[in-house]
Image (cartoon, helix red, strand yellow):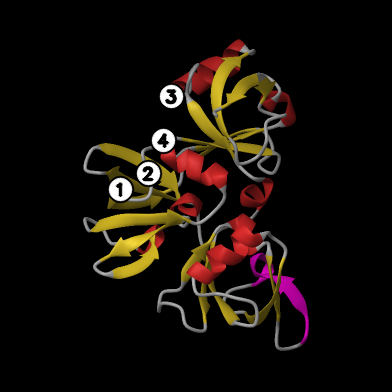
């Protein structure tokens, strides 16, 4: 058992106890109680927005990159300056020159049709959105857009991210774009390769803050993002879900 402050980012966690009564009551009203599962958000995902970009041979609408992923893709602009994709502004263009992530990042980008040497254009930065979906025509779940972007599948014969799925159309999951942590998180909601998802709608993300928004945050299985300061995060005890 560890505090939320000590827990690793990206890990699937189980709420064990909240030491402060007022904080416990507040979390309970949001549907978080002993045994609830949640994910501690990576710092890069907290401070950076998801972005939609277009590569040389990508789809017309482009692809979605989470804030953490976009920060690990370095580009060189026409004037010779270098920046991460996360630092680009709308309609900025550049050539991908380096990746600061591991092999998983390279594989994910190749799936999305992006690789070192390719041109890339930032179409826009995305506000926080929640995807409402049905898993195998049974469970209804809600996921953050950055998580939805890591689901790769097929719809109407086309392979694409779930962020490009159409409402009420069947989307068969082929694989997850990311490491073991995101796979474990999605699996906890029944989202695994082979299942069928149906997008029901997209709505504005809901965010609640108990402290500085750049320190610590969690995503709940109801699609809510909650921010905590160091003091509050130290009052929440969790276990990692194996």
**Occupied quadrant, residue 164:** bottom left
Residue carrying label 1: 195
Q: Are marks 2 and 1 in contact (CB under 8 Å)?
A: yes
The relative height of residue 13 versus residue 206 in the rendered view (above or below) is: above
Residue carrying label 2: 191
Mark 1: few, some, or many residues within 10 Å (few <14, many ≥20)?
A: some
Q: Are marks 3 and 4 in contact (CB under 8 Å)?
A: yes
Lateral position of residue 123 relative to residue 118, left or right? left
Give the Cα distance between marks 2 and 4: 15 Å
**Occupied quadrant, residue 13:** top right
The relative height of residue 123 versus residue 24 in the rendered view (above or below) is: below
Q: Where is residue 83? Give x, y as percent.
A: 73, 72
Q: Residue furthest bottom?
A: 78
Give the Cα distance between marks 2 and 1: 7 Å
Does the segment drawn in magenta span residue 204?
no
Q: Residue furthest right?
A: 81
Lateral position of residue 42 relative to residue 134, left or right? right
Counting residues from the N terminus, which is met first, the one under dot 3 or under dot 4?
3
Mark 2: few, some, or many residues within 10 Å (few <14, many ≥20)?
A: many
Residue carrying label 3: 31
Give the Cα distance between marks 3 and 4: 8 Å
Residue 222 numbered mark, or none: 4
Does the segment drawn in magenta span residue 82?
yes
Give the residues in magenta. 80-88
Give the Cα distance between marks 2 and 3: 21 Å
Residue 179 numbered mark, or none: none
Counting residues from the N terminus, which is met first, the one under dot 4 or under dot 1?
1
């Amino acid at each position: 058992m560890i505090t939320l402050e000590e827990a690793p980012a990206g890990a699937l966690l189980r709420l064990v106890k909240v030491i402060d009564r007022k904080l416990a009551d507040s979390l309970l009203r949001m549907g978080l109680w002993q045994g609830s599962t949640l994910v501690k958000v990576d710092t890069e995902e907290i401070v950076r927005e998801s972005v939609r970009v277009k590569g040389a041979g990508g789809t017309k609408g482009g692809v979605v990159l989470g804030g953490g992923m976009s920060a690990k893709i370095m580009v060189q602009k026409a004037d010779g300056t270098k920046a991460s994709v996360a630092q680009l502004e709308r309609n900025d263009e550049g050539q991908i020159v380096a990746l600061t992530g591991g092999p998983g990042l390279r594989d994910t980008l190749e799936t999305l049709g992006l690789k070192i040497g390719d041109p890339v254009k930032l179409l826009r930065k995305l506000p926080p959105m929640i995807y409402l979906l049905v898993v195998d025509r049974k469970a209804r779940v809600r996921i953050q857009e950055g998580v939805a972007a890591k689901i790769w599948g097929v719809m109407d014969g086309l392979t694409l991210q779930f962020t490009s799925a159409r409402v009420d159309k069947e989307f068969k999951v082929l694989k997850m774009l990311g490491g073991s942590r995101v796979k474990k998180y999605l699996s906890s909601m029944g989202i695994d390769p082979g299942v069928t998802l149906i997008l029901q709608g997209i709505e504005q993300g809901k965010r609640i803050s108990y402290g500085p928004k750049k320190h610590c945050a969690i995503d709940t299985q109801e699609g809510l993002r909650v921010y905590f300061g160091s003091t509050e995060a130290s009052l929440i005890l969790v276990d990692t879900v194996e």
